[in-house]
Amino acid sequence: MNLTDKEKFVSEMALRIVLCELLQKDQLMIDTVTASAHNLAIGCFGDKEFKPDNPEDWIQFLQPMRDLIDKLDPDYRKSCDALGDSHYKLPEEDK
């Protein structure tokens, strides 16, 4: 998938907003993410290769969001790695 710089910017911005709200356990964002995951899983937006076993488990989407942000901005990730910085994780993610 080729994205323009503007598309990368908008994608990263949207992901960071959602991830930040989820990491703060904002109930509206949790509800939005789980509803979207449910709709995607049942085919509301076409047939998808990946379908989560449990769309209600919003924790499972945190790491893929971080991974995608890293792919959208690999230079920033490299600088963080060089400094020994890592992503913030919720305690529930270690379960």
Image (cartoon, helix red, strand yellow):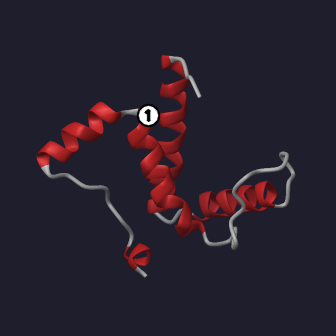
Q: Residue furthest front?
A: 49
Amino acid type at mark 1 = Leu
Q: Nearer the viewer, residue 84 or 14?
A: 84
Q: Residue at x 32, y 60 (%)?
A: 88
- Is 1 on the left or on the right of 85, as rendered? right
The outermost residue toward the left is 83
Q: Residue 14: horizontal and vertical position, in percent?
A: 54, 38
Placement of the C terminus among the 4 image quadrants: bottom left
State the residue at coordinates (38%, 77%).
94
Q: Position of residue 8 (x, y in %)?
A: 50, 27
SS assignment at label 1: helix
Relative to 10, is 39 on the left or the right? right
- Crowding near the residue tagged with mark 1, few <14, some 14–19, many ≥20 C-alpha atoms within 10 Å: some
Give residue 12's position: percent from left, percent from top: 48, 35
- Given residues 93 and 2, the one toward you in this image is 2
The residue that appears at 19% across and 37% down in the rendered structure is 79
Residue highlighted by disc 1: 72
The residue lying at 72 percent from left, 61 percent from top is 51
| Image position, residue 3 (x, y; %) | 55, 22
Seen in the picture, residue 21 relative to 75 is either above or below; the reply is below
